[in-house]
Amino acid sequence: MEILDVISRITHVGTAIVLIGGSAFTALVLMPAASQIPDESHQTLRAAVAERWKRFVHAGILLFLISGFYNYVRAIEDHRGDGIYHALIGTKMLLAFVIMFLAAALVGRSAALQKLRQQRGRTLTIMLTLAAAVVAIGGYAKVRGVPVDVPQEITVDAEE
């Protein structure tokens, strides 16, 4: 399983680099530069970028879900009874789901989510802030290791 563990970790981190990096590029470079061109050209560029970027977003979400689930299942055994770990990873997952929703909303066509697309800069800022929190939580959870005082096996006495 070790090679699968490595592949899953590389997939998870690599996907984060591409999607967070692409979102940061869009918010910090592309949008300010595109605002300098005429509106018609700006709209053409926005549509072309969104059409291409949505493939990365959709594939990235799928890769995140698969590799994240695999990584969690592999780590769960080492963290039985480790409440702090589960709280951290649970928070990380919830924030990641919000990020995935916002990313999909930005490249989607749903009329109900049009406001998120109209406020693209704000939505990207929220996504990048949440992504920074997810990276921080994941990094801490990974390097903190498994505390030695966490019971590895929980047993229930049948007579109680």
Image (cartoon, grey):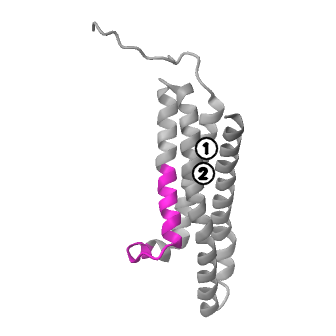
Q: Is the residue marked by circle 2 packed among few (<14), some (14-19), or many (20+) residues within 10 Å?
A: few
Kindly check if marks 1 and 2 are in contact, taking CB atoms under 8 A apart as contact. Answer: yes
Q: Which residue is mark 2?
A: 132
The residue shown at (66%, 65%) is: 22
Q: Secondary structure of the magenta portion, mostly?
A: helix
Q: Which mark is residue 13?
A: none
The relative height of residue 122 versus residue 157 in the rendered view (above or below) is below
Name the kind of residue labelled 1 in the image: Ala
- The answer to which image quadrant residue 75 occupies is top right
The residue shown at (60%, 69%) is: 55
- The answer to which image quadrant residue 114 occupies is bottom left
The part of the chain drawn in magenta is 95-115
The residue shown at (67%, 88%) is: 37
Q: Is the residue marked by circle 1 packed among few (<14), some (14-19), or many (20+) residues within 10 Å?
A: few
The relative height of residue 127 versus residue 53 in the rendered view (above or below) is above
Q: Which residue is mark 1?
A: 136
The relative height of residue 127 versus residue 119 in the rendered view (above or below) is above
